[in-house]
Image: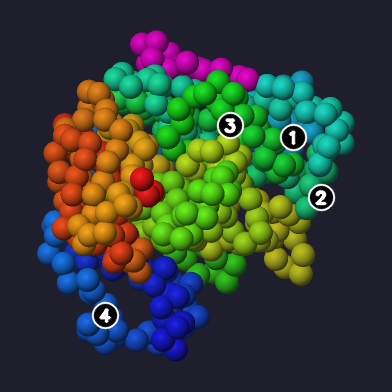
Amino acid sequence: MISLFRASLLFFPLTLALPNFSPPTSPWPLYARQIPAIPSYNDIFSCPAASWPPASIGSLLTPQTPDAELQAIMSEIDPKRIEAIITKLVSFGTRHTLSSQTDPNRGIGAARDWIASQMRSFAAASNGQMKVTVPSYVQGIGERILFPVRITDIVATLKGSVDPGRHYVVSGHYDSRCSDPNDYTSDAPGADDDGSGVAISMELARIMATRRPAATIVFAVVAGEEQNLYGSRFLAQTYKNASVNVQGMFTNDIAGSSTADDGFKDPYTLRIFGQGSPTTESVARASTRATIGGENDSPARELARFVVGVAENNYTQMNIPVIYRLDRFLRGGDHRPFLEAGYAACRFTEPNEDFAHQHQDVRVEKGKQYGDLIEFVDFDYVARVGKVNAAALWSLANAPMAPQNVTLNATLLSNDSQFKWQASNDTLLAGYEVLWRPTDAPFWTHTVPVGKVNTATINLSKDNVIFGIRAVGKNGYASPATFPFPG
């Protein structure tokens, strides 16, 4: 029973890290339905080992509160506009990647042109700061591609006012499918998968177009996801080939329903998936990561922790469990090509998928409605998901860039821990903080401000805790933490 309970702690991150926050619903209801009796937290955490090491170094880390501008951004996210976007996407009948690209009313071409026109209308209000491009390429015959087809993305780029070379990307995919992944003629409404993600990218583009983030934010809508992540791979490789500094990427995919297949409603929970050890690391670096216990501190996991810290609050009303996986079990999404390109990326997905309403022909069978229909989308829920994305993107773009080349002195036999990182001339920067947590804690627990320096020594042993270094801006925004490697 104890081992089962310890496993469940992954699903209660905020309850442990942020004791003053009260989510609107019980944390992780799926677990609550499966396990009716949960041991008392006091019984478990009263043991001496639970709070070890007994250090008083630094202060308890508190979550970041949205400032007035971010609160205004979140307040402008409109469930009615989200409903209108998804309704329009469904009206194209099918948005299958192989469907018509020339029919003005039906197929992926009509959807592409409408999305691009909407994005251009948002950019028109940006005083030249937002540019919309429609990059494409011809994909030859391949996996789930029956004939050569043009894959087209729609990309709205809001240029940063201070650090335009640093990019953060949010995406949804506008293609859809039914039961047969190669059936490009039958209706495939794709309301949740992934009209919800497209609506989030478009609504955030509309709202942020008139604002001035410090770093660049990209609002992308990609094609070809259902066939083999073609559009996202094209976008990620385009950025990589151009050496674009993408510091974080989020995809919203199947983020529109709060109702499970058994009817259980969980409208205040949003999963974020964070990959463990990067597959792009060299063999030597991966071996070092495993040796020092850094498997849980990959760039993607630090990005996920950051999201919880800035977006799990009363302004979003969302509980955000971090799932320690690349994606759902043996499944994939548009963040994967970004991970494979060496970028930190995570996936947002609703808490309990209803598989009768995704990848299904529209039909009624034995009295049950199948198909990804708009009637199963919760627009208020999508708006809250949009608020989580807004909080994450705006907080990332207005913080200094995360520290680079962070090392921990491994040659010194000492109970102190010595750190070094690359000096920065970032004009947003006020200083740095050393973060730490017990090795079995899922989130950072303590912070030690060290000033505007590039070295620091902390009277706490590297053997006993996990460390990270983050940058803090003059405006109070803080970056994700960077995990130190031996140096």
Which element carries disc 3, helix, strand or loop? helix
Quarter occupied by residue 441: bottom left
Does the magenta-highlighted stretch encompass residue 117? yes
Name which residue type carries label 1: Thr
Q: Which mark is residue 236?
A: 3
Q: Residue at x 31, y 52 (%)?
A: 411
Taking the image as shown, residue 354 lies to the left or right of residue 462, namely: right
Q: Earlier in the sequence, mark 4 or mark 3?
A: 4
Which class describes the residues within 10 Å of circle 2: few (<14), some (14-19), or many (20+)?
A: few
Left or right of 68 in this view: 233: right
Label 4 vs 2, first from the N-terminus:
4
Which quarter of the image is occupied by the C terminus?
top left
Which class describes the residues within 10 Å of circle 3: few (<14), some (14-19), or many (20+)?
many
> What residue would you read off at disc 2?
180
Up-down relation of residue 455 to residue 438 (above or below): above
Q: Position of residue 203 (x, y in %)?
A: 44, 33
Q: Position of residue 458 (x, y in %)?
A: 18, 53
Q: In the rendered structure, which amino acid carries the disc numbered 4?
A: Ala
Q: Point out the tag, 1 or 2, that comes first from the N-terminus.
A: 1
Residue 226 falls inside the magenta stretch: no
Q: CA–CA distance between discs 1 and 3?
A: 19 Å
How crowded pointer 1 is (Cα within 10 Å; few <14, some 14-19, many 20+) is rated as many
Q: Is residue 62 visible?
A: no
Q: Identify the secondary structure beneath mark 2.
A: loop
